Image (cartoon, coloured by chain):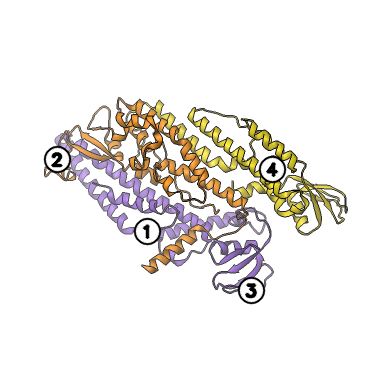
Chain colours: A purple, B orange, C yellow
Amino acid sequence: MFCEKAVELVRELHRLGDGQLPAFNEDSIRQVLEEMKVLYEQNQGDVNEAKSEGRSELIPSIKFRHCCLLRNQRCVTAYLYDRLLRIRALRWEYGSVLPAAIRFHMCAEELEWFNQYKKSLATYMRSLGGEEGLDITQDRKPPKSLYIEVRCLKDHGEFEIDDGTIILLKKNSQHFLPRWKCEQLIRQGVLEHVIS
Amino acid sequence: METQAYVPVPPGVGIEENFLSLDDILLSQENLPCRTESSFPRLGFLEKSSEAPDIPEGTKMEMPLWLAKGLYERKRRVLSVELPKVYREGWRTVFGADPNVVDLHKMGPYYYGLGSQLLHFDSPENMEIAQAVLNTFIGRFRRTMDSSQNAFNEDTSGLVERLDCLEKALFRAGQSGLNSFQCWETGRASHLTASSLVLNYRKRKIAEVQE
Amino acid sequence: MDPSEVEFVAEKEMVTIIPNFSLDKIYLIGGDLGPFNPGLPVNVPVWLALNLKQRQKCRIVPPEWMDVEKLEEIREQERKEDMFTPMPSSHYMELTKLLLNHASDNIPRADEIRTLVKDIWDTRVAKLRLSADSFISQQEAHAKLDNLTLMEINTSRMFLLDSLDCMYKLRTNLLSRGGAPKGHDY
């Protein structure tokens, strides 16, 4: 049957229901587009024949192929759109710099889209809350205190805090830091929030 | 509980599909028993059992919902759609007797979705199908709700196994409400944690390395 | 809403404290607070009360209803009635947790209070579930649920809304005349 590759693309995303981004399946997309080209050409031929020779019995098959064309289009559109939803979520989960492993899963256009999204989000955040702007990716839950105790889960190097002091985030070291400075690193799994 | 930043396009449920919903695309991939009411020239190769160049009129074949919907027309009928077993009278009676005993996952897993979509094809039994689907949902609601509200911290796989996709989504909604409440109650809500997405990526990476 | 956001809202509730320091009236966007005099009771929002308490600057006077006898009465009433009875505070759950976690030394019989409030909560949630089921099975179109608190609504909001949405759509099926699909769902 037609459209099987296209549905396979959709299944691939559906299986990863938690929002992970699988590698961009360029090969399958190309195969779907090829199938669409064949369907379109066959239909062009049949349409011409139906018109010039009055062969109206070809119409059901033309319609059949047309349905398949639209189905392929729907699957590919949904595939690309769902990936964009996932990529947008990455900005909120990881911050503006993505790990290389994830970037490798994106195609050039998706990387471009991510950069554009990043930029418009940054522009919006700069426009909020007076001169300094407001980072709306922070404090997604009401904070209980301004400072929190954190432990380093891996070596992360030097880190500058509000007053300009530089501290060294070394594996297993423990620090008392401004919450808003650590939230992103906790989400990325670099730091661990310690509750006394 | 970390609120997920990724929210997929929800399924339409009922008579309208949601164009970009992955769930609905997979629902519309379900096969229906069909019979061709005209011949389909030059598509014979789709029928594996025959060598003929055309699909002749009167061929019984399985077609995915999306194709049946696309080809179906009241005026110029090229196709008729038969009811899948679970929506026929025999099974409707079984569902009517006690909807809780049926394994809707095995029967479906898109029992409600497919049942609603079947209404596009003018079957004389449409009214009965719509009623049966609604009654099944209502009859099973208490169980879906109770399991989603009681099963916290327990192994829920046995409960979820027999649920239809729609019920499963409701089950998850119930669990996440309960889950976040209990996180709050036990004081874990103010604990900042790594994003579950990040953790899952890491798990997968480790799994790949081990392979 | 996340429960921690509901808790945040609850922190705006007023509570009486007995400060052990002096401070003039302070003027904030949300209203004026103080003046604070050692030994003199004053009303402040819960967030401030907890902050002062953590720094040992005050003693918290538990709200009137946070009392074993009163809560036992409420529990019996809640068990007896089919409807939801009015709660003494629309944030009874959050306030109990906040005050018991941070100021249990100011609240007599704190453990009993914790258990009682949990009992009341459980009774009410069971009731909510029962009425949700009869709502669905009788295919009602609207319901009046007086006296529910924000935290209670919040815990089952997603489940209930999604379920009602499904039921609505499956019911709409009954009205459809069938016929050729209109949209472009391929």
Looking at the picture, which amino acid does disc 4 mark? Tyr
Task: State whether discs 2 and 1 lie on one chain.
Answer: no
Secondary element at tag 4? helix
Residue under mark 2: which chain is it in?
B
Q: Please tell me the numbered disc located at residue C92.
A: 4
Residue at mark 2 to residue at mark 4: CA–CA distance: 73 Å
Circles 4 and 3: CB distance less than 8 Å? no
Identify which residue is drawn at 39% across, 34% down: B99
Disc 3 and disc 2: Cα gap in Å? 76 Å
Give the Cα separation between the discs numbered 1 and 3: 39 Å
Horizontal relation, residue B176 to residue C67: left or right: left
Pick whichever of labels 1 and 3 is earlier in the sequence: 1
- Which of the labelled discs sits on residue A167, or is there none? 3
Write down the chain letter for disc 3: A
Give the residue pinned by disc 1.
Answer: A24
Query: Whole-percent x and y of residue A78?
Result: 38, 48
Numbered label attached to residue B54: 2
Q: Is residue A154 above or below residue B102?
A: below
Q: Name the foreground residue: B41 vs C58.
A: C58
